[in-house]
Image (tube, helix red, strand yellow):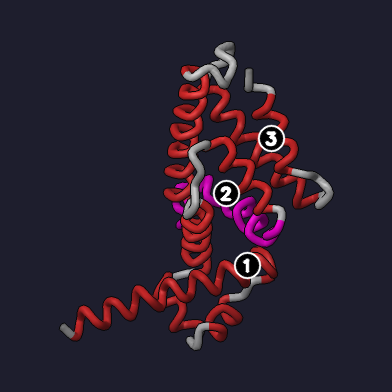
Amino acid sequence: MAQRGAYAKGIAKREEILTVALDVVARHGYRGASVREIAEAVGLSQAGLLHYFGSKDELFAAVLMKRDEVDSASPSTDTLDDLVRIVAHNAEVPGLVQLYAQLSVEAADPAHPAHGYFTERYARLRRRFAESLRTGQSDGTLRTTFDPDAVAALVIAATDGLQTQFLLDASVDMAAHIEALLDDLRV
């Protein structure tokens, strides 16, 4: 019974760390968020915090997973509308956009702790968007003159590219551009 309680406390502490880290990274970005600041905010030493994650990169990969979990917590029935909503929200958390952009490049190395996360995430998003596009083509709300698989990959590429442009120029309205792109697919 004691192990079960200790295990539950460990899971709860890990969730607390991720919630705090989401906030710290959103405010300070990838380079500005320190393990020390996150550890202090949850009442741990840096070594204590790294006990839960192993390294700063593993912590930040877990932060991105938590962000995805939070972003998908209240989905609508329209995956494309959800994408616009999430992209609009990203403009409010530039530090998380910075973290995502930085780690996505670093994760191209198969040895990076976030490699599996990004590989799985891109595959999952391509499937999900392609399925949504096929549904829209079938129900007559989207044009039938495009390949859903190709457009799904292009929408993700456009979203990532707009995030980079936003990081360089905060006046870039990512959500408006993605919405315009998706509107061009509608009947």
Q: Which residues are magenta?
A: 92-114
| Residue 64 makes an appearance in the image | yes
Q: Compute the Cα span from label 2 to label 1.
A: 16 Å
Viewer-nearest residue: 182 or 119: 182
- Select label 2 or label 1 by which is in front: 1
Q: Earlier in the sequence, mark 2 or mark 1?
A: 1
For mark 3, what is the residue?
179
Check the image and name the residue furthest to the left.
1
Q: Residues within 10 Å of mark 1 (few under 14, many from 20)?
A: many
For mark 1, what is the residue?
25
Circles 2 and 3: CB atoms closer than 8 Å: no
Q: Give, as a three-letter code, the residue at label 2.
A: Ser
Provide residue 99's location: percent of width, then percent of height: 62, 58
Q: Compute the Cα span from label 2 to label 3.
A: 23 Å
Q: Give, as a three-letter code, the residue at label 1.
A: Val
> Which secondary structure, mark 3?
helix
Q: Which mark is residue 144?
A: none
Viewer-nearest residue: 176 or 37: 176
Query: What quarter of the picture does the C terminus occupy?
Result: top right
